Amino acid sequence: MNELVTGDAVVLGLQPARLPSRALAVTIDLAVLLTVFVLLSIGLAVATVTLDEAATAAIAVATFLLVLVGGPVAVETLSHGRSLGKLACGLRVVRDDGGPIRFRHALVRGAMGLVEILGTFGVVGCIASLVSARGRRLGDVFAGTLVVRERVPAGRTLAVPPPPPWLIGRFAQLDLSGVPDGLWLAVRQYLTRMNQLDATVRASMAGRLSADLAACTGVQVPQDVPAAAYLAAVVNERQARDARRVAAGAGRGGPLRTPVAGPVPNPSNGVSSGARPTEGRPSDAGTPTAAPPEEKGTGSEGQATTGFAPPA
């Protein structure tokens, strides 16, 4: 299962789920819920055998609502949109912008599901899902949610698409040192899978990621550049800088050369003292080296001095 979640817990690389997979997930969820409801009803019937019929009916209704409505709401809230059936089918409930759902989203979906799935045996839900371009039922429409596929076929390596030619090199002066690695990963994943996203989600994610990138660089996104093209151009600029950095490092890290013979400056007087010995080879120790000539100066009385003071 491939999934990427940005810093805002926004899921990338997803496609809207269609009716067959959603129907299978709902069937699995209903089978589990009905099993739990039957077992719990039997236990409550044994425990409340001494109560009157009104109390027994009230407990039965409360159990029905608690299991068949409260159960899915609690599961989707705690699992951020993954029920047992959706987990088995590789589906997930997200917000329209790709973010994780909250309790209110799950509550609206559960309340509407009681009517369009349980009340009409799924007829209304199937019709709404077939009519909707994104496969949403009424509960998704009112809750502002979307059921998506979160499984991506394994073994596929997608490359980041190149930016438009007129944008290459435009952001060469942009400071990218403040962009965190997590944001780079989110941008790259978005660019590689943006064609798999719904058009509305794709535009929303591009705007959000470009705004985050502009906030890190301190430079606003140009008005004449689309958000997705801006992201591609900035990623291309960073890749170009990395390539230049690697090339420069390889040029400096070549094999060390053996020094050749040549004049070596004498640090004491700046005069060359002869040939430089080769590394790993001793110099001609037997040959005495001439002492450097003494510097002549002028004494206080204008006479030449040699730097030697005779004994008094």
Image (spheres, grey):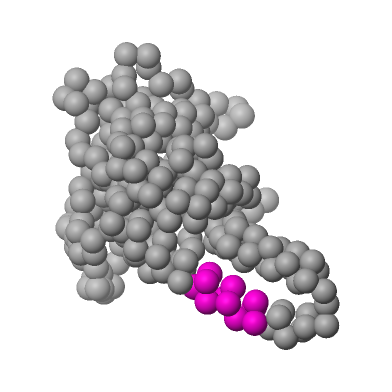
**Residue furthest top in the image:** 224
Residue name at image x 35 percent, y 58 percent? 23
When asked about the image quadrant of residue 166, the answer is: top left
The reply to whether residue 183 is in sight is: no
- Report whether 99 appears left or right of 45: left
Magenta stretch containing residue 77, yes or no?
no
The reply to whether residue 49 is in sight is: yes
Residue name at image x 42 percent, y 61 percent? 26
Magenta stretch containing residue 37, yes or no?
yes
When asked about the image quadrant of residue 170, the answer is: top left
- Report whether 243 appears left or right of 77: left
Residue name at image x 78 percent, y 80 percent? 48
Q: Which residues are magenta?
A: 32-42
Residue 99 percent across, percent down from the top left: 49, 44
Residue 58 vs residue 244, the one in the foreground:
58
**Residue furthest right in the image:** 51
Q: Is residue 21 above or below residue 293?
A: below
Residue 126 vs residue 71, the one in the foreground:
126
Q: Main secondary structure of the magenta part?
A: helix
Q: Is residue 131 above or below residue 51?
A: above
Residue name at image x 80 percent, y 69 percent? 55
Residue 154 percent across, percent down from the top left: 24, 64
What number of labels is visible?
0
- Report whether 205 appears left or right of 19: right
Is the N terminus in the top left, top right, bottom left or bottom right quadrant? bottom left
- Report whether 6 appears left or right of 235: right
Residue 295 percent across, percent down from the top left: 44, 41
Residue 275 vs residue 189, the one in the foreground:
189
**Residue furthest front in the image:** 53
